[in-house]
Amino acid sequence: MAVASVSTVALSMAILGAFLLLVLGSHRFVERQLAQFEIAVFLPVGASPRKADEVRDAIRKLPLTKHVELLSREKEWAEFKRSMNTEIDLGGVTGNPLPYALHVESKDSRKTNVLADQIGRIDGVAHVTDSRETYGRVKALADLVKILGFVAALILCFTTIFIISNAIRLTLFARRHEIKIMQLVGATNWFIRVPLVLEGIVFGAIGAAVAVGLVSLGSGYIATMVQERFPPMLRDLSSGIDRGLFLTSLVSGGALIGALGSLISIRRFLQT
Amino acid sequence: MIEFCDVSLAYPNGVQALSDVNLRVARGDFVFIVGPTGSGKSTLLGLVYRELLPTQGRVFVAGQDVTEIPQSAVPYLRRRIGVCFQDYKLLPQKTVWENLAFVLRVTSVPRREIRKRISEALDLVGMMHRCDSCPAELSGGEQQRASIARALVNNPPILIADEPTGNLDPDTSWGIIQILSRINARGTTVLVATHDNQVVDRLIRRVVALDGGRIVRDQDRGLYHHPPESESLCQSELTES
């Protein structure tokens, strides 16, 4: 029965742990896509370098600004000419017609549009592009992933607790005669309860430790496979959380579920 | 020592197991509780060690109303009552010695006392030579003797035996009853529920007969079946009680 309990805990916690890693990784992946949205700021054509510096300094002072870069007009013009080399005849264009442009990163990817609005109100700014529509769609997707992941994780948590509690209950059921005899000879409820709860903790912790091993092996194998077969943008599905902390939490969670499962299950057998 | 006052018990399914039972058992008594199957013998004994609660009435054990004690006090009540059953209820993974030691551990008896008490109990029932055997290695009679030893190891003032000879042959059954009689001779109050008429008729002790959940006879020195010529005497005994 001990093997049955431990293996049930191990499999249930392995599924839960793998799922949680996947949910956290997916959430982080989508959040990273959001963070890549930059704001492009354009000054009017003919604006002076001093004005460009003033606008840059004003943007830098905004609380939501993480990073602002004033792009080199010369480099941009050279790059533009190189990219349009065979398509447009630029022989008649003299000077650099491109306006000053800045790239701005937001500290909070979810407030990119707020920052864009603030930048639009700065004196000297002609145009702001924040890919608002596309950003909105990706943000909605990120929120959906977060909510669905949370709900699914919660359901899976309760399911895991239920499965593990049932496994412990079966173990106690198999020992019901022993528990009954203990009651008949005058054992107090705590005398009966404590060893069984400790057993639940140990089974839960051991099962979760086995689950940790399974998840670690599995995630390593999957990570290798993803890196070999998927495009670079999909390769980084790491959860972003400390692996040691996550695994310690899993073992602690297993021990806690084992203890709770024992406590809840033993109550029935102690009712006389 | 034990007193039932207007005790009735109806199970949740509606079965009336006991009705208006009044019974007094003095310290040192040896009482056979007899009756056909379903007459309420086990129910009566179950009330003494608080396995069951009456629907009506009160049960007193050593002056304490056991129907009123909190659940947390029940283990301490049971340490003063030794119980043995038809199916022995020994821990299968432990030896005879360990089964008895377990009871003493539960009741926090000092280690130096454990060996002494176990030896005394096993000597009394004649099981010292099998103390290292597990229940599966014992005969029915030996298991019942081990069960009695376990019931005695805490020196309880009351010993309850619920059908102790139910699974045993006549000779072994008589051996078990003799052990219970010796225990009673040391001052322990003994209640034995049985439908084994041979041991009842052979020992001739107090007999309380149940039928349909009611006490129909209570004789100081009785037989299992009431002799027809003494029926009128039995009725007057009940009236007086």
Image: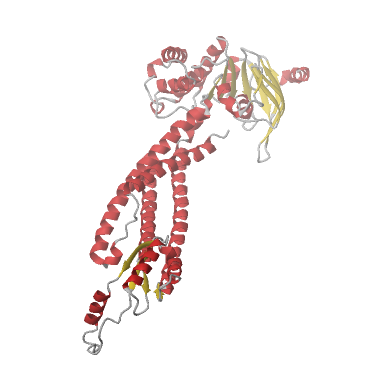
What residue do we see at 52% from left, 30% from top? Answer: A189
Residue A167: image location, x then y, percent: 44, 44
Q: Which quadrant of the figure contains the C terminus of chain B?
A: top right
Task: Identify the residue at image location x=51%, y=24%.
Answer: A185
**Above-or-below relation of A104 to A259:** below
| Image coloring type | secondary structure
Image x and y of residue A54, in percent: 37, 68
Closest to the observer: B83 or B238?
B83
Q: Up-down: is A15 above or below A105?
A: above
Q: Quadrant of residue B98?
A: top left
**Front one among A171 and A245:** A245
What is the residue that sits farthest to the top in this orientation?
Answer: B186
- x%, y% of residue A124? 40, 73
Would you say B8 lies left or right of B154 here? right
Q: Say which quadrant the N terminus of chain B sits in.
A: top right
Give the number of marks.
0
In the image, A73 versus A116, the foreground residue is: A73
Residue B234 higher or lower than A166, as above or below: above
Do we see residue A1 in this rendering?
no
Apparent side of residue A29 relative to residue B73 in the rendered image (left or right): left
Q: Say whether residue B20 is visible.
A: yes
Query: Which of B217 and B126 lies nearest the eye of the viewer?
Result: B126
Q: Residue B40 at what x, y percent from top left?
A: 64, 30
- Up the image or down, A4 lies above or below A104; here it is above
Q: What residue is rendered at 40% in x and 15% in y? A: B128
Q: Is residue B17 left or right of residue A58?
A: right
